[in-house]
Amino acid sequence: MSKPLLEVSNLQVEFNSRQGKVSAVRGLTYTINEGQSMALVGESGSGKSVSALALLGLLPKKTAKITSGSVKFRGEELIGAPEKTMRKLRGGSIAMIFQDPLSSLNPVLTISQQIVEQIKAHEKMEGKKAEERAIELLDMVGIPSARERVKQYPHQLSGGMRQRAMIAMALSASPSILLADEPTTALDVTIQAQILELLTNIQKDLGMSLLLITHDLGVVAGFTEKLTVMYAGKAVEQGDTAEVLANPNHPYTLGLLRSIPRLDRPRTSELRPIQGVAPDMSKVSVGCSFQPRCEYAQSKCATENPLFSTISTDRYAACWYPQNHALQNESLSK
Amino acid sequence: MVIIFLVAMMAIFADFIAPQGPEFIDLEMVRQPPGNGHFLGTDDVGRDVWARVAFGARTSMIVGIGAVSVALTIGITVGLLSGFLGKWIDTILMRITDGFMSVPGLILIIIFIALVGPSLTSVIFVIALATWPTSARVVRGQVLAIREQEFITAARVIGVRTPTILKNHILPNLLGPLSVVATFGIAGAILTEAGLSFLGLGVRPPTSSWGQMVNLAQQSQILLAEPWIYVPSGVMIVVTVLAVNFIGDGLRKAVDPKSVR
Amino acid sequence: MTNNEPVLIVDNLSVHFPIGSGLIRKAKGYVKAVNSVSFVINQGETLGLVGESGSGKTTIGRAIVRVNDPHEGSILLDGHELVGLSPKEMRPLRRKVQMVFQDPYSSLDPRQTVRQILVEPLVTHNLPLKNAQGEDRVDELLNLVGLDPAFASRYPHQFSGGQRQRIGIARALAVEPDLIICDEPISALDVSIQAQVVNLLESLKKRLGIAYLFIAHDLAVVRHISDRVAVMYLGGIVELTSSTELYENPRHPYTRALLSAVPVPDSVVEKARKRIILKGDIPSPTNMPSGCAFHTRCPLRTMLGNPEICATERPELKLYPSKKDDHQVACHFADESS
């Protein structure tokens, strides 16, 4: 059994905005073990990206605050840790890549300069050696002609290449866990497939853990072992990816799965959208935040906020009436 | 805001609040300190300072608003045509604009006034001539940005004619940044007018102008012993321009698209 | 609508963009965004147009509404030739084809109310503001797209992304077009809202008999909503057939790779899949490969030992004999099944 690497417990994050206090994350709990991959799924406003930034202490200090909860990395508490500790971890043991490589890479520095900068920040290596390592890394992530490419600037590379370069940078200090925030959303589908395959291989080769943040349930299915679904800042379902996708317990997860067209089902099946819109995050909800859109809601749901609790072994959901909504048995053809 | 309101009121109602008239010369009361029926004293020729300050406000307002109106009219037209029609019209118009901008404003103004002769009208026109390029550039920049928005494409797809697109879609979206340009323009115009009048190139006596009144401080006797003659107008200039600038700042923040949504 | 004539016939359409031209300089070269493309859309039919970056799918959509100008070829809308028309001549024809845009935020004028947005097309084409029953047309349009007529006095920023798209759809419907070009209409929306808009488009099609050109990069959605699908790569159509046939029996190696790259939310299926991973990046349209645009990445070509013809001759879109439907493929080796 592998040891827990990252333990997040009831994380809550608040922002100060013009509309007042916005509770962006309202309770997120998960554990990622060494070598394990977990997907954090949600739509816009679910709080998934904010939670990752909070982990690394990257939220703007003036406007955002972690109001409650704990984040432990290898047993050490990260919330409130001194900036020096956090800086060592960032890019070191905990690396992060983002959605848009064009804006995450410095346009006026060559790829080599950026990777070397990263390497030097975490390992004691001289210039020449660090440059060689940079080329090695680019090779590892599948960039052809790495030796020439390393001298180029970000805008000279294609979207897929840039993302690979970002991954190379992230891997430079051999991190124990990689946080990937929508790494393939901006990429074409065939390039997405390449990048996802790369990530999986790297993960296996390096025994690295992976936190994959995305809104794409298809991407999640093939590449992660564990799945946490977020809605309106809260974790609403968690469990083994295959199981959650086949038998969701929470009505939101079920709604999501029913509303997306899938290549593995007949094309004539009707899409069943989730009615209504996502809640206004600047308002605190009474009761379950999904209740206004929930088919299965009952009176209790409008008044009491369900807790994230155990449904069965390694299955959790925040719902008063979780059911085994077996997706396979749905009669879809009409 | 309040200050501007007061100044504007002053300008409009100058006749009433300064019954003695700014031009009424009372040689007996030359250079009197405040008091004696003259709220702020009299100046070197016996005119009531308070009245001159009040009427000076009117001058500043007229120049401010007048110059900016003319500048904006030219600027908006040029900017719209340049930004929307693009290509060679854009190139030609922008080179003309560059030409105007490359001549230092003050020199342009001084030469012009020297040719045409100083007066209220010439001051208004010459300030407008020197400042329209700014609004043209701002408008053009905005138009270029708006033009790329999909709702403009949508209007084209619907079949809306170009002049109608300009009127209904582009102009309303320009109001924001333009009001900022206009406000700062007014402040600038007031300052320039004061400067010109101070140099003797602007509004000539007997018409009152704040700048003109400050001019009198060149005489050391007035500067040292009779401060009531120039201090009030100096203060008015500073206060008014500051107030207009604050409004401009506030407008700029309010109009910033990041906060609108 | 007339007889059974197709709503849209596109024949040999090419759209080229000049690179680096200015007032004095001549164009240094051309980006061949769309290269000799031909297809037909029948009345009330949905043709899906899929492709990745540089495929030219968006450019085709814009060329049909004359936002981009075609370099050569013909576009017949309800029998009327669109290529070469002046803006004045084009205007009355704009009643027949409209467009729904990708970005719900920039496709509506933030300074106009919903009513003003919806009235604009009516006024531009001198259409009545009340329908035959005396009802207000704006109210009618809002009801059609599932929005409360009371929303007419509000501004775009007061609505969510999904609602704004509905307003955009209402605007397109105002002139009662025969064809609507949907340019990535749901890509910018949240997943759970996408289904709402897709269902709306489908129900409108049933009610009003409108044809759609549905441009998107999401294959699963395109499959769901389209009757027929055209797959594009670097400016050309590589495969064109019915939706069912395309997904069951793809013949072009690119289509196959594309389909295999689309993830499905089922772990069991995913893990069992054999993915075709294409090598390298999509070439830039400014630097098009010779012959078949796909030959530089084609796994079929590699398997067949790198035949010369792929690098020298551009394959035409030809009928592939299939038991089911009209199936066109642009590949020299379409017969080789993998």
Image: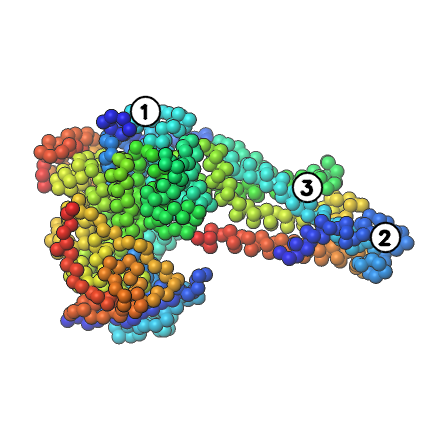
Q: Nearer the viewer, mark 1 or mark 3?
A: 1
Q: What residue would you read off at disc 2?
A: B46
Mark 1 lies on a secondary structure that is: strand
Q: Residue at x 35, y 65 (%)?
A: A285
Rendered location of residue B92, percent (x, y)? 53, 32
In the drawing, does residue B46 fall left or right of residue B176?
A: right
Q: Earlier in the sequence, mark 2 or mark 3?
A: 2
- The lab-note entry on whether marks 1 and 3 share a chain reads no
Q: What residue would you read off at disc 1?
A: C81
The answer for which chain carries disc 3 is B
Which residue is nearer to you in this view: C32 or A243?
A243
Q: Residues within 10 Å of mark 2 (few under 14, many from 20)?
A: some
Q: Residue at x 42, y 50 (%)?
A: C157
Rendered location of residue C333, percent (x, y)? 12, 34
Which residue is nearer to you in this view: B41 or B163?
B163
Q: What residue would you read off at disc 3?
A: B124
Residue occupying the far front of the picture: C133
**A70 shown above or below B143:** below
Mark 3 lies on a secondary structure that is: helix
- Measure how far apart labels 2 and 3 are at the Cα level: 28 Å
Which residue is nearer to you in this view: B155 or C71?
B155
Which residue is nearer to you in this view: C35 or A204?
C35
- Measure how far apart labels 1 and 2 are at the Cα level: 83 Å
The answer for which chain carries disc 2 is B
